Image (cartoon, helix red, strand yellow):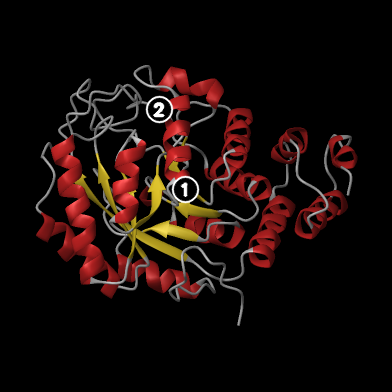
Amino acid sequence: MSGQNLTNEKVPTEAAISALVDGIISGEHVITEAEALSLSQLDDKEPLYDGAHLLTHTLMGNGFDTCSIINVKSGNCPEDCRWCAQSRHYTTGAGIYPVLPVEESVAQAIYNRKQGVNRFSLVASGRSQSRKEMEKIVATFKAIREACDVHCCASLGLLSEENLRQLYEAGVTTYHCNMETAPSYFLKMCSTHKQEEKVATIEAARRQGMRICSGGIIGMGETQEQRIEFAFFLRSLGVQSIPINVLHPIPGTPLEKTSRLSEEEYLTTVALFRFINPTAYLRFSGGRDLLPISTVRKAMYIAINSAITGDMLTTVGARCEEDMALIKEMGYTTKKNTDWEIIKDE
């Protein structure tokens, strides 16, 4: 399959989309940005959705990865990310508290593992973490690993390689650091740090032996072209897990009056992310509660094969029991996998 064939189509035909899918599945073709843009301009998106569905289930099987998070430290963040309730630059009413007691995090990890969740992550506000905060967080991860067999993940900001080594030795197998949006749009959303610093963090985490989870937020005013740019950026970083957050406009933040994405824009973005990152886990994340259940089901049909379940930082997410029932209904399995090993159909 030649990329030139689809690029030359003003309106890609179903046959051209099918050939593109076949080329991606066989490994003979990698989608180009021009092709992705062409797909995004289809009037009838169903062939795009069906193509993404075929990619998902052929290349990824029916395994569905689940994780839960606990906001282990909240608020008073010095960064000025325009979407974030925890920034000290904005008045949002978000909770402010130091690193939680070890026992509280361990209890939450045990509870979520009993609900069938595969992963558990400690998420902390702030650009980075102090030495004392890191000591407590590392102790927490060691206690969690002693208490249950859940995979441990961490999202703690821009850490040093030494900090990341400590986390890995404590049992953390995945490090999360969102790129947030396309490189061409990031500086409009945050001025206190750069994406290059985030890239340096995930590269350091990878050197320590950790897998990478990195995605971002759609619906912050970026264009569809920039969403495509963002998906290719994540592909260039070799990201294995991509959380796709939908902006939840929080009162007090600069984006509080941002218009919501249409359901079609959301589903199109999910499908394009699958074409561009065919073997990554695409993950329901923040803002999912803003979507109608019909759209949630459609996204799972198209390409979503992982989710953060439970409470979501400063906004309410979906309960584990409801998610597990939906995952089963949509034909997926949450059978515990080794760290992101692809689960093929039985």
Q: Which quadrant of the figure contains the C terminus?
A: bottom right
On the image, the x and y values in percent for residue 118 come to: 37, 67
Helix, strand or loop status at disc 2: loop
Q: Is residue 266 visible?
A: yes
For the point 33% across and 34% down, the residue is: 160
Note whether 93 is above or below 116 in the view shown. Answer: above
Task: Describe the element under mark 1 as helix, strand or loop.
Answer: strand
| Amino acid at dot 2 | Thr
Name the N-terminal-most of marks 2 and 1: 1
Identity, as a three-letter code, of the amino acid under mark 1: Ile
In this figure, what is the number of numbered marks?
2
Does residue 177 appear left or right of residue 55 in this picture? left
- Residue 141: x %, y % from top left: 23, 57
Q: Nearer the viewer, mark 2 or mark 1?
A: 1
Decide which of 94, 59 is in the foreground and name it. Answer: 59
Q: Nearer the viewer, residue 219 or 335?
A: 335
Residue 73 visible in this rendered orientation of the protein: no
Residue at screen point 45% across, 76% down: 335
Q: Identify residue for label 2.
A: 258
Horizontal and vertical percent position of residue 265: 57, 40
Q: Which residue is found at the position 45% from the left and 18% from the top?
A: 187
**x 76%, y 37%: residue:** 32
Compared to residue 187, the image places residue 40 above or below, namely: below
- Check disc 1 and report the residue beneath it: 212
Disc 1 residue crowd, few under 14, some 14–19, many 20+, Cα 10 Å: many
